[in-house]
Image: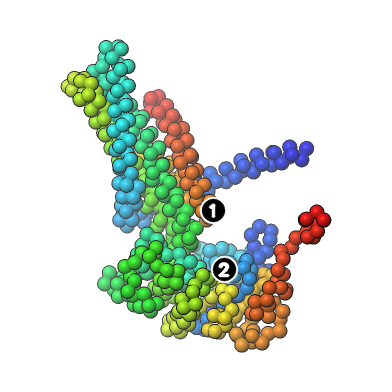
Amino acid sequence: MKSLTNFFEKIGYSVTRRIQRLGTAARLFFLILISSGESFKRFHLTMKEIYFTGVMSLVIIIVSAFFVGMVLGLQGYYTLQKYGSSEAIGVLVALALVRELGPVVTALLFAGRAGTAITAEIGLMKATEQLSAMEMMAVNPVGRIIAPRFWAGVIAMPILASIFSMVGILGGYVVAVIVIGVDEGAFWSQMQANVDFRYDIVNGVIKSLVFGVACTTIALFEGFDAPPTAEGVSRATTRTVVTSSLVILGLDFVLTSFMLGG
Amino acid sequence: MSDNLINIQNLTFGYGKELLHKGINMEFQRGKVSAIMGGSGSGKTTILKLIGGQIKPKSGSVSIDGQVVHDQNLSGIYKLRRKMGMLFQHGALFTDLSVYENVAFPMREHTDLPENIIKDLVLMKLNAVGLRGAYKLMPTELSGGMARRVALARAIALDPDIIMYDEPFAGLDPISMAVICDLIRTLNDALGATSIIVTHDVAETFSFADYIYFVADGIVAAEGSPKQLMASKLPFVKQFIHSEKDGPVPFHVAAPSYNSDLAL
């Protein structure tokens, strides 16, 4: 009987703890929005963070995008060839990248590269009392440290996703046109004719904006909520990648349903 | 104007149901260097956090210049904190900023001073702690003692009325310790500030503090000038000052009998 009680007690504790964390994350999100004035008034703080989260992520984004585009070109060509429509390879590569792979893979890479860096940095700032020191200097750490990083992530994500899609298309072009020999005119003209600005490109940008908000909020919250120990920061960093990845994939499904339905 | 800048009255504080402080009364006189001493885990640093408004007491009050800290809203607490400087145990320097930028940080945040004035002020503060020549260094390039001195320069950047020190001597070599001791006294007198030091280093603190509080079991166990405390017959004070391993503070943590634990 006692072990059964303990079992339910543990489940109850785990559920209430998760709800509590969700509430704390929501509270932090609203605090960020309220304290965001500083991030725009002193935009150099946000610019500095855009450099760290955006510019420093460029190498992994560009290299990954090029390979993803090449694989898409290769796989797409051999599938389309069976139906005699290999000229449609440009459309396939572009739509796959702009609608789905660009925003999703960028967000996953962003969570692994910039998200973990943000969590570790904030977690260590907390562990080394830098956030407390700021508070004692009458400086709000949410406005000075958290909000600029949040806006940097939100601004950087759509730009990175756009770069990912562009480089991916270039990768697809290299494989399909230069290596395999698909007609260059057909590759570009079919793409131009079938990729819609409103339904494909804008929806892709909306997705990456939402992913930017989700990824950066998760990374910041995990850092802010991390126990101030080496183990605490390491666990928080892992949680950032796991939670961000799951949230990105879940949100992608929800957003796609709405976008296709609309 | 009262002689006391900070008053702590009947303060109780604890985490959960356990009380860490069970009715603390302290008064910190203007212009004096006061120390709060006690064993590890006796809640010394918590008292600094209560003075700084980072946490709220369960009952009792902490007031600064007549203003009750925990009755203030956030902007009121921030206003009070602008009168304070705090030196954290390990300095808490911002690791992405240079020594110069660390000291300039509070000036940039709270004043509209032009860059040339900020430069002069930063160099003056760094000169006061003997580190003007290190202004270009990053925190990772500093020794523990140097980091503590830079943090001190940052803490006095806006000429605060109150300077709080959390374990300023922890982990320092004897030379750095002597330097920090001298700086605490000199800066306090030069700025006309009120200093509160949380520490358990007896020899250093007794050499320069004006008044000392001993905290044990959640209350002020003893208080007085270093001279009065040296002559104290209180068992706790004697054990602490003379570093005796057993006494009112037992060597062993409360535990079941040794025989039963070893199944003898």
Element type where label 2 sits in the image = helix
Query: Could you tell me which residue is drawn at 30 percent across and 56 percent down?
Result: A44
Query: Could you tell me which residue is drawn at 48 percent across and 40 percent down?
Result: A243
Query: Could you tell me which residue is drawn at 53 percent across and 63 percent down?
Result: B54
Element type where label 1 sits in the image = loop
Q: Amino acid at mark 2?
A: Thr
Above or below for A199 versus A215: above
Residue at mark 1 shares a chain with residue at mark 2: no
Spot occupied by residue B40 in the image (x, y as percentages of width and height): 62, 68
Residue B105 appears in the picture as rendered: no
Residue at the spot of label 1: A227
Query: Label 2: how many residues lie within 10 Å, few (<14), some (14-19) or many (20+)?
Result: many
Q: Is residue A140 left or right of residue B55?
A: left
Above or below for A72 versus A147: above
Judging depth in this view, the residue of B60 and A118 nearest the camera is A118
Residue at the spot of label 2: B45
Spot occupied by residue A237 in the image (x, y as percentages of width and height): 47, 46
Q: Amino acid at mark 1?
A: Pro
Above or below for A93 versus A229: above
Query: Distance of mark 1 from mark 2, alpha carbons?
Result: 18 Å
Count of picture labels:
2
Q: Quadrant of residue B58?
A: bottom right
